[in-house]
Amino acid sequence: HEPQRKVEMSIAELTKTHCSAPDGTDHSVITWVNEIATLTQPDEIVWCTGSAEEADQLAELMVEAGTLTRLNDEYRPHSFLARSDPSDVARVESRTFICSVNESDAGPSNNWAPPAEMRTTLDGLFASSMRGRRMFVVPFSMGPLGSPLAKIGVQVTDSPYVVMSMGIMTRMGTAVLESIDDSTEWVRAIHSVGAPLAANDTDVPWPCNQTKYISHFPETREIWSFGSAYGGNAILAKKSFALRIASVIARDEGWLAEHMLLLKLTNPRGRVFHIAAAFPSACGKTNLAMIKPTIPGWKAETIGDDIAWLGKGADGRLRAINPEAGFFGVAPGTGYSTNETAMDTIWGNTVFTNVALKDNGDVWWEGMTDEAPEHLIDWQGNDWTPESGTPSSHPNSRFTVAAAQCPTIADDWESPQGVVIDAIIFGGRRATNVPLVVEARDWEHGVYLGATISSERTAAAEGTIGELRRDPFAMMPFCGYNMADHWAHWLSVGQDLRTSGTVPRIFQVNWFRKGPDGSFLWPGFGENSRVLEWILDRVDGQLAARDSALGLLPRDGDLNIHGLELSDETMQQLFAIDTDSWKAEAASTEEFFATFDGRVPAAVTRQLEHLKARLDA
Ligand code: GDP
Ligand code: PGA
Ligand code: MN
């Protein structure tokens, strides 16, 4: 019995793109693909190889279908613009479900539906949903193929846009399929835009369905996504697998799947650090991952900008990999003055979604340059001028580009063992209350800081922009199990690290505190390197800190603001702790914890009591 050879034979058979299973094969992927094809009834099955020719052919087809506009090669070589349906522009959290067997395992912060009921609903929706379309089979690896920390998935989809995106965001193709044998565990991901075509129907540029379901079955490691082609809903390797399903696998196996960027920093003395930082969507992960330090002597290199898988290495230290192979970044606000590295990454070979088209065939969005071009075609395909009074690009418009193209990518970004994590940072978008930087007193206090992140809503998901909401560990929309159990899991990972090695220090940052006039107090972007310097000098044992009710703060003069025009008053406002506001915040935390039916770990509740006592003192 030689499963390896059997797969190869089957691939050869199936690349002929037909619907029926080749005789005599029982490979798990083929069996499953045939089950899905029987349900969804595509006209054709295409097994994606991951080759460059395949990507070019797909792009050509999408240009013909009107899904993509080819950009001017002179300005943006081998790049494309996609305009989505105006209703399909962001993640839909209200349509995202965790269908665990027990409702309590999904917890109060996830939408739950009984698995059997959801399967019935999905069977109905997916029945013949790919009629008139091609079903692509996309085998992918999260993490370098063959790394002990990597995981395999297979996505089927009827969206060529999703295939193209998966080709950029993951390691995709035949080599992955060939690595799957009878003993391989792999995640099943089924995606349909939910827009079957009858014989005489003409297609639209961005097929989708008003009914949307992004459903996860944690126990069987399955994802079913219907009705949307937007990245976070449809590129199932990303938020659905690498966070929602992977967080459950990680809980079961003793590691962590987190919404974190990974950054390598070298200080002027030559010491190398790696940090992992969790911020909610559109709160600065990609920017920090690509930071250009403004302070002399520091070097920053990118490892990942959105997702990190962390676990105890053989050396007893916390190690992390970036499971992705590309960036799906927010376009607006990205310019040479804010994120030069991103601008230099997206010079070509990039798919842009919902940005504006310039008359010269290049792209533009708000914040790319200070001055807007005189004329554009906006993200909905309409003429636009600076007088139009609407943004030319959707606030959640995106670029999709290979990580390897990033000029600051670290040489160890694909290290199969992962990099050693020296510090963990939690953050959010807070106009008030949260200081520029705080250090946790210990791991337990750090877990409390992560558990109590609140952040103002952004355009990355549906909802009212600016509204404050709880987003523990920046994982509120992404934790595949009960959030309170996630905190308990973090505590146990800390315990485990303590017994065998070093425990990384935990910090909280807030780049978004505002002054009385409503403008940001802190310059942000490259200047955030000053905060990283303080954090890593602390890790390096170079600095003492001052205690406060919230945790450890920089002593006066320790945070390097040399060369910045920041008044004493601004500095005071950046670190101000308003006792009454914090008492209100603690009361709201108590209410939030109460929603978890007694599942909040005692160590976390103890931290809340400690905070309340400090505020009263
Ligand atoms: P991500 O979705 O977490 O990766 O967030 P991004 O890095 O893409 O940033 C989201 C938005 O926040 C963009 O418009 C950025 O320009 C903006 N942003 C990022 N970092 C900072 C910062 O330090 N200060 C301010 N004021 N804005 C920032
Ligand atoms: P992000 O999320 O804003 O964290 O990059 C991307 C998404 O919408 O899936
Ligand atoms: Mn990002």
Image: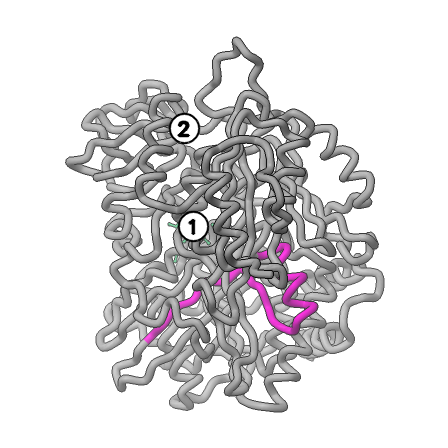
Q: Which mark is on residue 553?
A: none
Query: What numbered label is drawn on residue 83?
Result: 2
The residue at 24%/41% (across/down) is 369
Magenta part of the protein: which range? 243-265
Q: Nearer the viewer, residue 360 or 288?
A: 360
Instruction: Please tell me how crowded label 2 is: few (under 14), some (14-19), or many (20+) other residues with Cα within 10 Å.
Output: many
The percent position of residue 229, horizontal first and vertical second, equals 52, 34
* Label 1 element class: helix
Horizontally, residue 11 falls left or right of residue 244, namely left
Q: Hey, which quadrant is residue 312 in on the image?
A: bottom right
As for residue 250 lying within the magenta part, the answer is yes
| Residue 375 showing in the rendered view | yes
| Residue that appears at 54% across and 64% down | 434
Q: Is residue 7 left or right of residue 395?
A: right
Q: Earlier in the sequence, mark 1 or mark 2?
A: 2
The N terminus is located in which quarter?
bottom right
Question: Looking at the picture, does residue 590 appear above or below residue 30?
Answer: below
Identify which residue is drawn at 77% across, 52% down: 100
Residue 303 screen position, x and y as percent: 38, 65
Residue 194 is a magenta residue: no
Task: Give how far across and how far down residue 507 sits, in percent.
Answer: 51, 73
Q: Nearer the viewer, residue 296 or 420?
A: 420
Mark nearest the camera among 1 and 2 is 1
Amino acid on which the number 2 mark rests in the picture? Arg
Distance between mark 1 and mark 2 Cα atoms: 19 Å
Q: Quadrant of residue 301?
A: bottom left
Q: Report which residue position mark 1 lands on.
A: 169
